Image: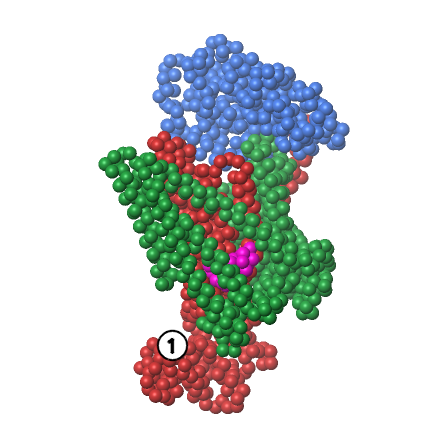
């Protein structure tokens, strides 16, 4: 039997193995991409409803006896007036047949606690409204919202439902009167955190993320670029430089939570910086993103051809001038790309921030990097832990916003790379 | 004066120093402008740098030490009865004093001694603030003055300025070292305190982990409930599940993308895989807890298996998904580093593609792939959010991935999030766990980076 | 002859004109000088064209390869001789952008036919590369690789025998028989190349293609390989691409001269070197360019 015959004899089996192997490879990719699709589908499927919110139209009489009995328009008085009573009164007027304390409490629970604040804000903005009768759209309670979105099943026995038949009846009446409808949930984008799902928003966390990233950027970009320039352009090749390099590579792979421990022990316990503050979060994230930025910046510096350095030095420029005038400008786009990618990492990071207390429940929008704050991913974590059904969709929606920001940053990085990519 | 105003004053001082240095350069040069060694602005920069650096150094030093100094002074002046409390109670008292200072004065119901301390604290704070700015501004002025006096035609200002810049760059590059040192010191220091209360051996070999009981009965370490073996086992179990997903899928995707896929498929599939790497871990955690865990539980129920709703399987599975792109991009790199000549040699002998991959490329790339997998394992071990959200809190010692386990990172988070007394073994245990985590991942990384580097050198 | 040379110079300037806008039919075919056919060919190539994307690398090449001969292909860099060589066992398949047209037959069967199996083809037409490329495995495993994947040995004894015979034929057995388990990458350059030849022989091909096999070797190693080729031609047909005219003159029976993708002249090696008929061949051999 000659070679060709022997080879032919085994071909069938070998090609079957080939096909199998190829199929495995394709399967792996398909599996990975299916995970991706499944993840996005699950997040979007759960979250898109959060951008809508059920509102109820109540007819309120802004009685001057309640708000401003003396008619002085004193701002402090206006602020502290009992707007809740007005809301309750209007609900009673809407459903006059309701009696008994328990039923009344259920009735009052139909609209969000935020309704009183809405009225307060309206009056504070325009005190002339006092004494008038107004139709106001206020957010409904989260249970009603869930019923409208189909997360509470009307078909189930009453005992297993959070909303009883009585309340469902009220809701149907409101719908019939066109006093209940779905509207864009602007509070989600403008409010801080809240225990009430219908009042909770991501703005506080977004601002916290902004301050944290600002601190991170202001520290990590100059330090990262400085370190890269030193290592690439000035550092002598010796043990010390080797140690620094190995160190940077290792830091890049240290678990993020360890950076959190560092932040807790050093910044909070030793330097007594405030807990939960974006400035500490920024410091921790700076240390965490530095390796990324340094490695990217060094790659950018390496890609600048030596001929440019030679040309500058040949003209009599000092080494510092050569770097500042010629090498840095050429390497800058690459460094920026690396920095944006580092910032995107920092934006999605949450574990180290838990350690330094940025996990607190904070209602107020932070006014600066020293105010207590939380960040978007930690907000996601906090809401994911909340038991209310309405937080599920809000968590998913917050994730969508977070992913949106990340996509934006990465697109920017890709755009920068494409635009300034240069082949020497 | 307010802080922004003072900062403005400092800024103006710097500008003034620059201008003064520059003018002095012109002045000392006189008509012999050419006799100046450097251009006048370098003399200006030199003076300004000598203003800015001492001022900023002093500012940072002062800010980092003032809290400690003031607290020590206040404590020293407390009555002996209050001072001789246990460190924990003293800490509480100091916190109380600080809170009262922050809210604007001694509370009405405060002890007289405490009220005095609050006032004293406030005075010292004000004093420190004033003294700090006086010191900072004078440091700037003195520094600039000294530099200004040195200006002469033959003074090499440019070289000095560049030397200072170079020094600053050097400092930037050493931040990485300081970070490592900081990590080591902070976890080591607290760990040693922990090991004073709980013997190292008990910690590393103990089979029972329940830090909560130690707190409740106030038995410092004597309960022997700080045995971390269940945590290590849980971590390994979750990481193992993750690698079972990530290693085959990641490796096979890398092989397919680099050996089989057309450039069009590669150009779309690769970035899609990279998206998986860019998703924040908290999102994976939420996905695991909300979607995957209930799904596994329901599937288990159908099959007659009891799957915990916080099973190691759910957390590991999702963690595996997260690590897929990590494994695939590292493997892709090493597979691409195998020279084309190897492939040609194999094809020329009549090998099929899969034979070439399995018998030539994979063996050749093996060290690199092993290195990549080690890095992936280290990442799985250190991953926090997924397990915090999807794995359990109870320390079960089990090898069954359907049961709930807890991990090192989960325990660190649970021990440190929320109200904490800083000296209890409960809090310190988190640092001991952190130390173990740091050492293990460091070891894995060092080995992996070494292996990968050796591998790359082989084909260069 | 002069006319022809001028035509070439006008019509086929370097690459510039061979753009994609020119269809193959428009190009003037250059007639190869000398006899391209042989009496009993193992391989016949007719109208072979290769395009790498826009680049027309091989233009209408016709040539035969006889049993038990060494055919040398010479020509200046980038003339397409390596490209043509890679057509003969379809190694161009691994390059995405390469397109081969025309007809190449191995013992009467078109190797680019859909029914021809590339694995079987390559088992019959082996190839040795410019740079020695032993696999990062032991010497034994390197040689055993081909027999293993093709299932040529029924048992370990047979495999051992194949490995030993191949190493002997490649003249390497004496040097390595005591260290077969050591990695092949640890050998010297010349030994590595002979290992690659042994690896190729182990599959018992009919034809061995050699792509500048000595260009990375020192003169002594080169001499050994050349000696080896002389012995191998007793059993195999060998096609060698070489940059060294002396090597072509020493080892080959026939020589083909390529220029910018055209096969200019083919003939007995002695005749080509002593009496080139085409102006371009003469210029190349006398060192006027190349």
Question: Overall secondary structure of the magenta stretch?
Answer: helix
User: Looking at this rendering, what residue extends furthest in the top direction?
Assistant: C274
Q: Nearer the viewer, residue A274 or B257?
A: A274
Q: Is residue A263 magenta?
A: yes
Residue B400 visible somewhere in the drawing = no
Q: Residue, x 44% and y 42% (percent of image)? A: B167
Quick one: which chain is red? A
Quadrant placement of the C terminus of chain C: top left
Q: Residue, x 73% and y 25% (percent of image)? A: C161
- Residue B309 horizontal/vertical position (percent): 64, 65
Q: Quadrant of residue C17?
A: top left
- Residue C8 horizontal/vertical position (percent): 38, 20
Left of A176 or right of it: where is B157? left
Q: Is residue A127 magenta?
A: no
* B314, above or below B106, in the image: above
Q: Residue, x 51% and y 70% (percent of image)? A: B117
Residues in magenta, as a range:
A262-279
Left of B148 or right of it: where is C98? right
Q: Quadrant of residue B337?
A: top right
Residue B216 visible somewhere in the drawing = yes
User: Looking at this rendering, what residue extends furthest in the left direction?
Assistant: B31
Q: How is the image coloured?
A: by chain
Q: Colour of chain B?
A: green
- Residue C277 horizontal/vertical position (percent): 44, 12
Q: Residue, x 56% and y 78% (percent of image)? A: A162
Mark 1 — residue?
Answer: A121
Q: Nearer the viewer, residue A273 or A192?
A: A273
Quadrant placement of the N terminus of chain C: top left
Quick one: which chain is blue? C
* B44, above or below B286, in the image: above
């Amino acid at each position: 039997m000659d070679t060709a015959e022997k080879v032919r004899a085994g071909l069938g089996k070998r090609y079957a193995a080939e096909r199998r192997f190829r199929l495995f490879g394709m399967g792996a990719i398909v599996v990975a991409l299916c995970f991706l699709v499944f993840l996005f589908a699950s997040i979007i499927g759960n979250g898109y409803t959060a951008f809508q919110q059920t509102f109820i139209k109540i007819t309120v009489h802004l009685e001057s006896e309640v708000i401003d009995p003396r008619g002085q328009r004193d701002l402090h008085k206006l602020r502290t007036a009992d707007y809740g009573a007005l809301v309750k009164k209007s609900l009673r007027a809407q459903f006059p047949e309701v009696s008994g304390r328990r039923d009344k409490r259920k009735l009052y629970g139909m609209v969000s606690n935020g309704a009183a604040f809405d009225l307060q804000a309206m009056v504070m903005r325009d005190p002339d409204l006092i004494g008038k009768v107004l139709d106001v759209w206020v957010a409904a309670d989260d249970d009603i919202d869930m019923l409208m979105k189909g997360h509470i099943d009307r078909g189930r026995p009453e005992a297993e439902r959070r909303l009883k038949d009585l309340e469902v009846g009220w809701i149907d009446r409101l719908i019939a009167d066109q006093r209940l409808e779905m509207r864009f949930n602007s509070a989600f984008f403008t409010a801080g955190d809240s225990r009430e799902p219908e009042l909770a928003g991501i703005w506080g966390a977004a601002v916290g993320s902004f301050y944290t990233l600002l601190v991170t950027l202001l520290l990590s970009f100059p330090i990262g670029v400085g370190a890269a320039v030193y290592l690439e352009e000035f550092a002598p090749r010796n043990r010390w430089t080797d140690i620094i390099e190995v160190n940077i590579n290792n830091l890049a792979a240290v678990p993020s939570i360890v950076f959190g421990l560092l932040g807790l022990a050093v910044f909070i316990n030793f330097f007594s910086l405030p807990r939960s503050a974006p400035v500490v979060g920024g410091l921790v994230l700076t240390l965490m993103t530095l390796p990324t930025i340094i490695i990217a910046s060094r790659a950018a510096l390496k890609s600048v051809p030596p001929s440019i350095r030679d040309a500058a030095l040949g003209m009599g420029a000092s080494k510092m001038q050569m770097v500042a005038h010629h090498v840095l400008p050429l390497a800058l786009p690459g460094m920026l790309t690396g920095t944006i990618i580092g910032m995107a990492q920092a934006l999605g990071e949450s574990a180290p921030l838990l350690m330094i207390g940025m996990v607190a429940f904070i209602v107020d929008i932070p006014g600066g990097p020293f105010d207590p704050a939380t960040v978007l991913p930690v907000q996601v974590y906090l809401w994911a832990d909340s038991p209310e059904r309405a937080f599920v969709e809000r968590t998913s929606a917050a994730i969508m916003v977070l992913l949106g920001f990340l996509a934006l940053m990465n697109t920017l990085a890709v755009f920068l790379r494409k635009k300034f990519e240069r082949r020497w | 004066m307010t802080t922004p105003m003072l900062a403005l004053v400092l800024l103006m001082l710097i500008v003034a120093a620059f201008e003064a240095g520059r003018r002095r350069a012109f002045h000392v040069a006189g008509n012999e402008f050419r006799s100046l060694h450097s251009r006048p602005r370098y003399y200006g920069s030199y003076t300004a740098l000598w203003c800015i650096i001492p001022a900023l150094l002093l500012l940072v030093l002062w800010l980092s030490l003032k809290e400690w100094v003031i607290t020590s002074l206040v404590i020293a002046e407390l009555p002996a009865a209050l001072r001789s409390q246990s460190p924990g109670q003293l800490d509480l008292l100091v916190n109380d004093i600080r809170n009262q200072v922050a809210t604007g004065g001694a509370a009405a119901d405060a002890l007289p001694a405490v009220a005095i301390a609050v006032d004293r604290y406030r005075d010292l704070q004000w004093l420190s603030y004033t003294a700090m700015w006086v010191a900072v501004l004078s440091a700037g002025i003195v520094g600039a003055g000294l530099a200004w006096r040195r200006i002469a035609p033959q003074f090499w200002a440019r070289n000095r300025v560049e030397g200072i810049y170079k020094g600053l760059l050097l400092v930037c590059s050493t931040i990485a070292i300081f970070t490592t040192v900081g990590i080591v010191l902070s976890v080591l220091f607290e760990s040693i305190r922990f090991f004073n209360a709980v013997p190292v051996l008990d910690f590393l070999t103990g089979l029972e982990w329940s830090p909560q009981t130690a707190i409740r009965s106030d038995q410092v370490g004597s309960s022997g409930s700080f045995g971390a073996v269940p945590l290590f086992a849980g971590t390994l179990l979750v990481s193992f599940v993750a690698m079972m997903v990530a290693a085959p899928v990641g490796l096979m995707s890398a092989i397919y993308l680099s050996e089989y896929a057309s450039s069009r498929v590669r150009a779309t599939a690769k970035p899609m895989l990279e998206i998986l790497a860019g998703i924040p871990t908290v999102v994976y955690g939420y996905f695991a807890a909300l979607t995957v865990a209930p799904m596994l539980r329901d599937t288990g129920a159908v099959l007659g298996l009891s799957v915990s709703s916080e099973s190691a399987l759910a957390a590991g599975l999702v963690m595996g998904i997260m690590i897929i792109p990590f494994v695939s991009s590292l493997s892709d790199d090493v597979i691409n580093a195998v020279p084309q000549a190897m492939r040609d040699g194999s094809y020329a002998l009549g090998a099929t593609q899969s034979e070439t991959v399995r018998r030539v490329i994979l063996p050749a790339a093996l060290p690199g792939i092993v290195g990549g997998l080690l890095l992936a394992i280290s990442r799985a071990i250190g991953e926090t959010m997924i397990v915090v959200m999807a794995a359990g809190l109870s320390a079960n010692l089990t090898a069954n991935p359907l049961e709930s386990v807890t991990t090192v990172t989960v325990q660190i988070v649970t021990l440190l999030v929320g109200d904490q007394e800083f000296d209890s073994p409960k809090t310190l245990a988190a640092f001991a766990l952190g130390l173990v985590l740091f050492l293990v991942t460091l070891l894995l990384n060092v080995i992996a980076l070494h292996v990968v580097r050796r591998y790359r050198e082989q084909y260069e | 002859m002069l006319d022809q040379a001028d035509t070439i110079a006008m019509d086929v300037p370097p690459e510039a004109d061979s753009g994609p806008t020119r269809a193959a039919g428009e190009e003037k075919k250059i007639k190869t000088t000398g006899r391209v056919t042989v009496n009993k060919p193992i391989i016949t190539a007719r109208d072979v064209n290769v395009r790498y994307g826009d680049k027309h690398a091989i233009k209408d090449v016709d040539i035969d390869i006889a049993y038990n001969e060494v055919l040398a292909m010479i020509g200046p860099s980038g003339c397409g001789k390596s490209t043509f060589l890679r057509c003969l066992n379809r190694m161009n398949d691994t390059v995405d952008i390469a397109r081969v047209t025309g007809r190449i037959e191995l013992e009467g069967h078109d190797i680019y036919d859909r029914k021809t199996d590339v694995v079987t083809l390559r088992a019959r037409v082996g190839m040795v590369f410019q740079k020695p490329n032993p696999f990062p495995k032991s010497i034994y495993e390197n040689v055993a690789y081909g027999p293993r994947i093709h299932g040529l040995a029924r048992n370990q004894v047979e495999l051992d025998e194949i490995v030993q015979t191949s190493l002997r034929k490649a003249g390497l057995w004496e040097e390595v028989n005591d260290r077969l388990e050591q990695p092949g990458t640890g050998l010297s350059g010349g030994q590595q190349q002979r290992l690659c030849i042994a690896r190729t022989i182990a599959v018992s091909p009919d034809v061995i293609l050699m792509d500048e096999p000595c260009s990375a070797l020192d003169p002594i190693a080169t001499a050994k390989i050349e000696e080896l080729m002389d012995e191998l031609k007793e059993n195999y047909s060998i096609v060698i691409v070489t940059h060294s005219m002396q090597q072509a003159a020493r080892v080959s029976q026939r020589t083909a001269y390529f220029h910018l993708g055209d096969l200019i002249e083919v003939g007995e090696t002695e005749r080509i070197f002593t009496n080139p008929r085409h102006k371009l061949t003469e210029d190349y051999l006398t060192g006027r360019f190349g």
